[in-house]
Each structure stands twice: as C-alpha cells, then as structure tokens.
Image (spheres, helix red, strand yellow):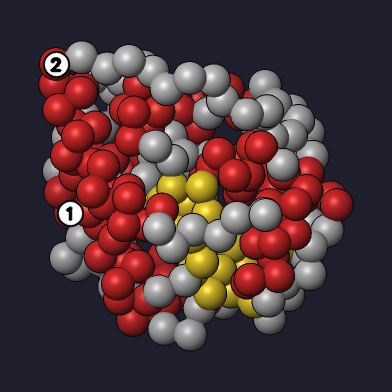
C-alpha cells in the first residue's frame, strides 16, 4: 500500500493530478479533506462557505478517521498546505509518501484572481508548503514539468513515490467527478472541460501593484522548493 499526501497551494494542477491518480483504478482519492475544518476553525469567508460546511465533515479527527480507514490498495490525498492550521492534526502523516506540487507564483496569482479577489500570501500557501516540506520531506515536482511531458513526468514521479506508473493516469472523462468536493462548481471549470493534461503554458502573466508584490513575496518560498524538484531529463 502506498499512501500519498499531495501538498500544494490553489490553482496548481492539483485537481488534474487527483483525477490522474483516481483514473488508475487502484487508488482512492480525497479532495481537500481538511477544507471544511479549516473554514470552521478560521471563520474565513470563502466562496460557497455555507455549502462546504454543510456538505463536509468539520471535525478534523473525523476526516482523518475516514481516509485512514480506506481499503483501496493505494490512497491519494489532494491537500492544500494552507489548510494545515493549528487544530488540524499532522501526526497521521508520519510514514506517508509526500508529494509537493509547485507552480510559479505569477501563474498561481493570475489564476486565483479570476476566482477570488485580493489573495494574501497565506491564501496561496507557499510559506506553509515550505514548512510542510521541512517537516516531512518528500518529492517535489513542478506543474510545468508535468504539462511539458505528462507520460515522462508521471512515470518519474510514480517511481519516486514507489508506485508503478499506469497509462490510465493520462486521461479521464470530462465533467465533474465523484471525488469532487462541493466547491468544484466554483473552482474546477477548466479541469471539468479536460480529458487529460493541458500542454505547456505560455509566457508568464504580467502582474501589477498588489499582485506583483504578492508574487515577489512568494518567490523565495517557491525557489526553495524548485531547487529540490525532480525533472524528466
């Protein structure tokens, strides 16, 4: 059994990766299982907050008990680094395989701004992800690496995680998926229109004012993880 804790911030290919692992057929997945506890503990006003709290367990111990009881051969948790606040346990993660998905801050911020206004450094999760890497270690891979050559990147990644690669990971049916959290209707429009990984991204978006300053603040954390990222070369 391989148990994978996949950490990222938002807007970072994380949903497509969850679909890829679900498509294997031997891997249970969970979509941001600590999102509802995070909202309950912080009181933050996120899109669809009331629906999320009504539809998903808010007790983090209940969340942990659910995924720890999974009986599929393998488990993949899509996890947002910024959800792991005080009151959300981490002790379950000892002994898991840790995967860190990273994406250039300018791309993250440009995408996030389309869905929610004025993100902060805490919202996009870069400092928290470095903290988790320092605690647990793991495998780091960039979204650009995956999109440039999905078969090679996922094969290399699976090898690093101790999991056999399957070609089925490269495609999935369009539309919503059984693993989606209730928030999918707000956040997952692009990936719901996909049946596989998109091709390489173009030039970096040009950010201004607060967005540019936020990207500058996030860059040192991104670069810390980027130095540890695997490649397909």
Against 81, residue 162 (above or below) is: below
- Residue at figure coordinates x 68%, y 28% from the top left: 199
> Mark on residue 41?
1
Which quadrant of the view contains residue 197?
top right
Direction from residue 210 to residue 140 in the image, left or right: right
Q: How far across and how far down the image is residue 28, in percent?
A: 66, 62
Frontmost residue, 11 versus 207: 207
Q: Quadrant of residue 213?
A: top left
Q: Can you tell which quarter of the image residue 44 is in?
A: top left
Near mark 2 (Cα within 10 A), the count class, few <14, some 14-19 or many ≥20, is: few
Residue placed at 70% from the left, 70% from the top?
A: 159
Q: Position of residue 196 (x, y in %)?
A: 74, 34
Front-lying residue, 75 or 213 = 213
**Numbered tag placed on residue 80 in the rendering:** none
Query: Nearest the camera: 201 or 168?
Result: 201
Q: Quadrant of the N terminus?
A: bottom right
Nearest to the eye among marks 1 and 2: give it. 2
Residue 34 visible, this angle: no
Instruction: Determine which of the numbered discs, if any, sits on residue 209 in the image.
Output: 2
Pick the quarter of the image with the C terminus: bottom right
**Image location (x, y in percent) of residue 73:** 73, 75
Q: What residue lies at 67% left-to-right and 54% top-to-bottom?
A: 232
Seen from the viewer's position, the closer of residues 84 and 133 is 133
Which residue of the protein is positioned furthest toward the bottom in this rendering?
Answer: 95
Residue at coordinates 33% horizontally, 81% vertically from top-left?
Answer: 91
User: Which of pointers 1 and 2 lies earlier in the amino acid sequence?
Assistant: 1
Q: Is residue 88 visible?
A: yes
Q: Are marks 1 and 2 in contact (CB under 8 Å)?
A: no
Q: Residues within 10 Å of mark 1 (few under 14, many from 20)?
A: some
* Residue 21 coordinates in the image, percent (x, y): 69, 55
């Amino acid at each position: 059994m391989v148990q994978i804790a996949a950490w990222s911030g938002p807007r970072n290919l994380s949903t497509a990766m969850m679909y890829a692992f679900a498509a294997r057929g031997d891997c249970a997945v969970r979509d941001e299982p600590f999102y509802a506890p995070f909202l309950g503990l912080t009181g933050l006003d996120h899109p669809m907050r009331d629906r999320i709290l009504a539809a998903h367990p808010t007790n983090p111990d209940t969340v942990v008990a659910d995924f720890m009881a999974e009986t599929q051969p393998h488990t993949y948790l899509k996890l947002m680094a910024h959800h792991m606040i005080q009151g959300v346990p981490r002790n379950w993660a000892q002994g898991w395989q840790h995967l860190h998905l990273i994406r250039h801050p300018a791309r993250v911020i440009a995408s996030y701004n389309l869905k929610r206004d004025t993100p902060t450094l805490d919202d996009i999760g870069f400092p928290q992800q470095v903290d988790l890497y320092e605690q647990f270690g793991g495998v780091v891979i960039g979204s650009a690496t995956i999109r440039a050559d999905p078969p090679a990147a996922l094969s290399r990644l699976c090898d690093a995680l101790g999991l056999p690669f399957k070609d089925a990971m490269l495609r999935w049916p369009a539309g919503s998926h059984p693993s989606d959290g209730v928030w999918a209707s707000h956040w997952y429009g692009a990936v719901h229109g996909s049946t596989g990984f998109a091709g390489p991204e173009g030039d970096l978006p040009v950010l201004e004012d607060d967005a540019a300053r936020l990207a500058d603040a996030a860059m040192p954390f991104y670069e810390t993880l980027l130095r540890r990222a695997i490649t397909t070369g």
